[in-house]
Image (cartoon, rainbow, N blue to C red):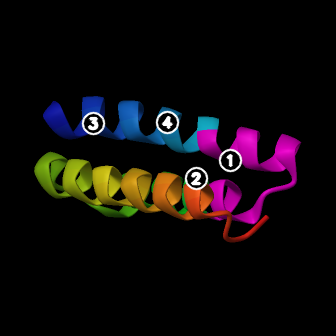
Amino acid sequence: MNTLWASLVWGSVGMGFAIYGKKQDSMIPLCGGLVMIACSYFIESAMVMSVVSVVLIALIVFLCHRGIGE
């Protein structure tokens, strides 16, 4: 049950990043969002999925803040 909720939450966050990256023509949020969506499909543990997703979000924000990938 926890895996289902984690998959829903992190997949939705990934979809938000992907839509934002598409509309802004920025590859970092687009690719990061797609990777986050894929992680929600392939990782079966809610804890591991959450850790991977938080690391991906931190990486996306860090790279966008540095201006890489625009």
Please say if 65 is above or below 24.
Answer: below
Whether residues under marks 1 and 2 lie with C-beta atoms below 8 angstroms apart, the answer is yes
Q: Quadrant of the C terminus?
A: bottom right
Question: Which element type, helix, strand or loop, lies under badge 3?
Answer: helix
Which residue is painted at 58% across and 63% down in the image? Answer: 66
Compared across the picture, whether 41 is left or right of 12 comes to: left
Label 4: few (<14), some or many (≥20) within 10 Å?
A: some
What label sits on residue 49 in the rendered view?
none
Q: Which residue is mark 3?
A: 6
How far apart are the two marked residues, 2 and 3, measured between alpha carbons? 15 Å
Q: Which residue is mark 1?
A: 18
Q: Which residue is mark 4?
A: 13
Label 1: few (<14), some or many (≥20) within 10 Å?
A: many
Compared across the picture, whether 17 is left or right of 42 comes to: right
What label sits on residue 33 in the rendered view?
2
Please say if 58 is above or below 31.
Answer: above
